[in-house]
Image: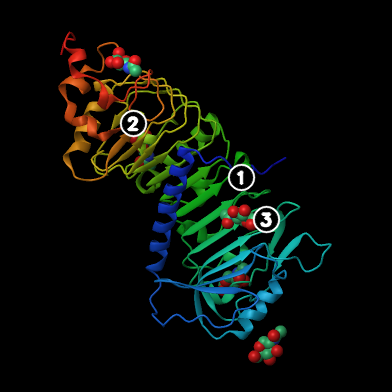
Amino acid sequence: MTHCVPPHTSANEPTDIMLFILFLVLTMDALIIVRHYTSRDAFVCSDYSPCVCEIYEPYGLVVHCGGAVDDKLPVTALDVWKVFNRTKVRHIYWLDLLSLATESESSDIIKIPADLLNGKSVDRIAINCTSIVGPLRLEIHPDAFRSSLHHIGHFEVAGCDLSRLGFEFLANSTRLISLSITRSINFRGFPPMAFLARLRSLRIYECLDFQHWNQIADRLPLLESLFLDGTQLGDRPVNKLVNSITSSPTGNETLQQLSLWENRLTRIPDGVSSFKKLSYVNFFGNAIRTIPKGSLAFSPDVRVAFLILSKNALTDIEPGAFQGDFSEALVYLDFNRLTRFDSAVYEDMLQQMSYVTSTAGLYVHNNPFVCDDCHLSWLIRDKRHLLKRVHNGRCSNGTLFENLNPQGYDHCLS
Ligand SMILES: *[C@@H]1O[C@H](CO)[C@@H](O)[C@H](O)[C@H]1NC(C)=O
Ligand SMILES: *[C@@H]1O[C@H](CO)[C@@H](O)[C@H](O)[C@H]1NC(C)=O
Ligand SMILES: *[C@@H]1O[C@H](CO)[C@@H](O)[C@H](O)[C@H]1NC(C)=O
Ligand SMILES: *[C@@H]1O[C@H](CO)[C@@H](O)[C@H](O)[C@H]1NC(C)=O
Ligand SMILES: *[C@@H]1O[C@H](CO)[C@@H](O)[C@H](O)[C@H]1NC(C)=O
């Protein structure tokens, strides 16, 4: 049995950070894809009704069909076919099919017909099957996007029942590099298809079916970004997955971004330090308790961009846990249970961050640091210049690190 996780509703701080990071990642994605897009016609929205067209500079036209924005009439896949039969623009940037109506009231299947685009091409396609009765089944004709197979760079589905989706409609795509599946059910894995070997980015959000599928390393050998977020996998499946990637012929060399938030992890997966190009790691919202020495050792050849361990159960970080080039890194350890801020853990990282005029920083909001012994004297008294890279460090009694009196540590040894 599989279920969809309900959307998050809280608007607390880590969630905002996540949204911001998500935004950054999506923007980067858009940039990757637009590089493929060369023709520079002036962008003009003609009549796409009942769909809505907007211009999204500098990328092109975005056409939204369906959706519960206001009391609009329901839009079916056939209506979309008619729109593209009528309109003249050869290429649009983004086709967004949101909550399309089924062909009849009694049906729970959204059927995307052959040649939906009537000879037109698009860069990005998004299909959202969310309905008031839950995820609708999605069925896509193998020739649905025939005219766009040499253009599609990104495909995403959200809120769909995937039991009728076999991905044949992407089989002959030649430019697909990014695939995203959100809050969908009955995912049965990807069949062996050549296009998968080209994928650089796979994003799975809040789908629980990944418990049953562990062929990422076999099917997607060139992945640079792997986001399995809210998939609730647990330590063992995640370890198996990460190890299968590190031991594949290309895995160590290709993966750059690894995101595993909300996966019930209690420890850092083995093998994270094997990736030679990894610069983005996100373990937000797990139950990780300790970070052993060397478990987050990044290659010296990459600049770490993000290391996110917000909202875990961290009590202990061993000396040498973090290794690598942190000179431009954003490191988040907020919302944990850390009581110590030892020089053997942080000094090297903060020293690297302090050299550049970048936004590098260490975020430690909401940890009950102990300040009334001598272990903070290195930072508060001896290396105060490093303090500016530590954001929101507070003692368990609420005093900010910046407001601690250095003379309070005069009696401590250096
Ligand atoms: C599709 O376009 C053709 C040519 O413009 C037209 O003859 C035909 O009626 C259109 N079909 C539909 C269903 O709108
Ligand atoms: C899918 O549609 C639902 C309902 O409109 C919306 O709440 C959700 O954010 C959409 N998901 C995505 C990924 O666009
Ligand atoms: C993909 O292309 C091959 C060769 O042209 C063709 O035989 C096959 O039917 C195509 N598959 C799909 C799903 O369009
Ligand atoms: C990947 O890295 C790990 C750890 O360094 C190593 O054991 C493994 O052999 C490497 N795999 C390949 C294919 O290079
Ligand atoms: C909190 O503890 C620190 C270190 O012992 C002390 O310097 C500071 O005055 C305390 N702050 C409050 C508000 O008690």
For residue 225, side relative to residue 329 (left or right): right
Q: Quadrant of residue 291?
A: top left
* Residue behind label 1 places its C-beta within 8 angstroms of ligand 2: yes
Q: Secondary structure at mark 3?
A: loop
Distance between mark 2 and mark 3 Cα atoms: 39 Å
Q: Determine whether 166 is above or below 64 in the image.
A: above
At x 34% / y 24%, what residue is drawn?
394
Q: Quadrant of residue 314?
A: top left
At x 57% / y 35%, what residue is drawn?
233
Q: Is residue 191 in view from this perspective?
A: no
User: What amino acid is found at the position of numbered circle 1 in the picture?
Assistant: Pro
Where does residue 8 sit, x and y in percent of width and height?
58, 42
For residue 387, side relative to residue 260 (left or right): left
- Using the image, tell me which numbered label, if any, was put on residue 130: 3
User: What amino acid is found at the position of numbered circle 3 in the picture?
Assistant: Thr
The residue that label 1 is drawn on is 7
The residue that label 2 is drawn on is 392
Q: Quadrant of residue 371?
A: top left
Other-residue count near label 1 (Cα within 10 Å), few / some / many at <14 / 14–19 / ≥20 = few
Q: Determine whether 224 is above or below 75 in the image.
A: above
**Ligand 5 shown in quarter:** top left
- Using the image, tell me which numbered label, if any, was put on residue 178: none
Q: Which image quadrant: the N terminus?
A: top right
Q: Secondary structure at mark 1?
A: loop
| Nearer-N-terminus badge (1/2) | 1
* Residue behind label 2 places its C-beta within 8 angstroms of ligand 5: no
| Nearer-N-terminus badge (2/3) | 3
